[in-house]
Image: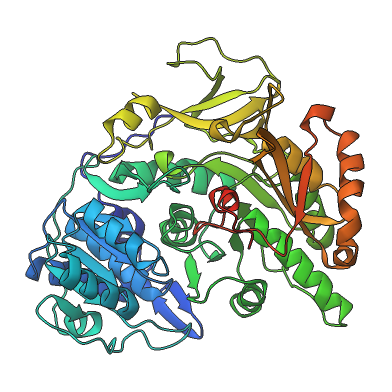
Amino acid sequence: MRLQFPDTLNMADYFLFDRLREGLGAAEAVRWGNTRFDYDRVADSARRVVAVLAAHGVRRGERVLLCLPDSPIYAFAIFGVLARGAVVAMGNPDAPASQIEYLVEYTRATAVITIPKVAQALREARELRGVGEELSLVLVAKDAATGDDVDAPSGFETDALFRDFHAEVSTTAPAEKLPKLHRDEPAMWLFTSGSTGEPKANIHTHRDYAFNTEVYAKETVGYRKGDVTISVSRLYFGYATGTNLFFPFAVGGTAALFSERPSPEVMAKALTEYRPTVVTNVPTMLGKLLEYDAEEVKQGRPGLDLSSVRFSLSAGEALPEALLRRWQARFGSDVYDGIGSAEMFHIYASNRPGDIVPGSLGRAVAGYELRILPEEAEGVGAAPCEPGQIGVLWVKGDSVSQCYWLDRDKSFKTFHGHWCRTGDLFHVDEKGYLYFAGRSDDLLKVGGLWVAPREIEEALMMHDAVSLAAVIGVEHEGLTKAKAFVVLRGDAAHKAALIEAELVAYLRERVSKYKVPKLYEVVADLPKNDRGKVDKKALRAGVTS
């Protein structure tokens, strides 16, 4: 499938202003606690952001860094930046100050839109280390709890550079004329997870987002008008920027937002109050929600109500078959597990309505082409692996990144024209279903033989006592050994001292003997990175929760 888009294409039009032209201005665009914002209001605020950026000298093509919690302000800001013709970069507002400094310097941002605690850290960094020489504007918005008034001053001390978001936007007339942008102009920079170093930005154009929205969101999983969406992942992560903002906006749906850190309790409240039809989730939270639900039922309470949910999405890491089956058995609700990346913007292979194969990541999304090639392959002309044989996944599609910013060497290794070498290990079956085997840089060589941690983790999580597992390589007595970290379910915690022998016996029945870890550690939880994935870098550094 090769979609054709006009030469002139702006994501702000495609996702927002076109809804007004379709007569949906009064339709609900954002739900924020008990407050509703319609498309007219979001569009008006976005146009005001355009005018503020222009007044402060932010030009077309320059980067604007958003470090915001999930609130209506995120929608105002992101569509305002895109409509201005500037380039969106996104960061975690809860990240350490050093990470914020890195993003400002790396992106050469001329503007930042953020909240007081980030603005204060940035002000101190400028005074002490001269960070952000290119900055001409820092807009500081209120750090609002869900449902609070976002049309209120931030309370931050302003000056010539640091300006109050509400004061600037409310007193500036909305821009009437917007620049006409080419579909292949840079629109957003999406960051890698930084698992092997500092995050790198993928440069994406306006049509990248429109393409994936058409083939994945609309055609594959079926977003539709009237959908109400919520998300575990936060909007600064491209996975959620798509599923919980762009995709519902593209069909005239509603993005239901909450600013609190996701937890089973917060998610239970969102499910009850928002009655979503689409839930963006990750495997670790699916497991925690099952545990939360079981405890609620044990205490004589009703448990989670998913009756409004048409489907959930899962990505970020492979969804274990055992976990999916437990979810389906308890809630009778579909989860469409898929694989995507910052390099491709979003999901390019997925399970879908009427086509779920537990344990797999589904089939290619129409419009994308996938190949499993030997790890040593230097180009797509290499002979593909046979079905069942593990190799590296390569993907071709019109949402592929142009390059990594300031890293030509890494770009050369990853991007090959229309193709991207993902670095993810997979095998494919005869019907084209993908099965994840881990990252190529996660492979362990134990006793001279290669071990894929994912295979062991999947086997461990099939055990009734195990809620979550992660396997890494550690140095032990001068040799590399596989070590398993396991999180036990509540009912199993009391027998933690006996679990190792039980798990060893269990694994020996399911994987080759040389793959069975020699070392085990029971932990309360596993560390996660800011995208919700198990952080193996932290595990290697000795951080276990």
Q: Is residue 247 above or below residue 296?
A: above
Give the x, y percent position of residue 483: 71, 43
Q: Is residue 309 above or below residue 431?
A: below
On the rendered image, what quadrant is the N terminus found in?
Answer: top left
Give the x, y percent position of residue 299: 86, 82
| Residue 175 in sight | no
Seen in the image, is 354 located left or right of residue 34?
Answer: right
Q: Residue furthest front?
A: 477
Residue appearing at x 65%, y 48% in the figure: 336
| Quadrant in which residue 143 is drawn | bottom left
| Residue 545 in sight | yes
Q: Is residue 356 above or below residue 235?
A: above
Of 202 and 513, nearer the camera is: 513
Seen in the image, is 523 located left or right of residue 130?
Answer: right
Give the x, y percent position of residue 505: 92, 41
Seen in the image, is 7 located left or right of residue 210?
Answer: left
Of 480 and 159, nearer the camera is: 480
| Quadrant in which residue 391 is drawn | top right
Q: How many marks?
A: 0
Residue appearing at x 16%, y 54% in the figure: 62
Give the x, y percent position of residue 205: 28, 43
Seen in the image, is 7 located left or right of residue 446?
Answer: left
Specify how the rendered protein is coloured: rainbow
On the rendered image, what quadrant is the C terminus found in?
Answer: bottom right
Of 458 and 514, nearer the camera is: 514
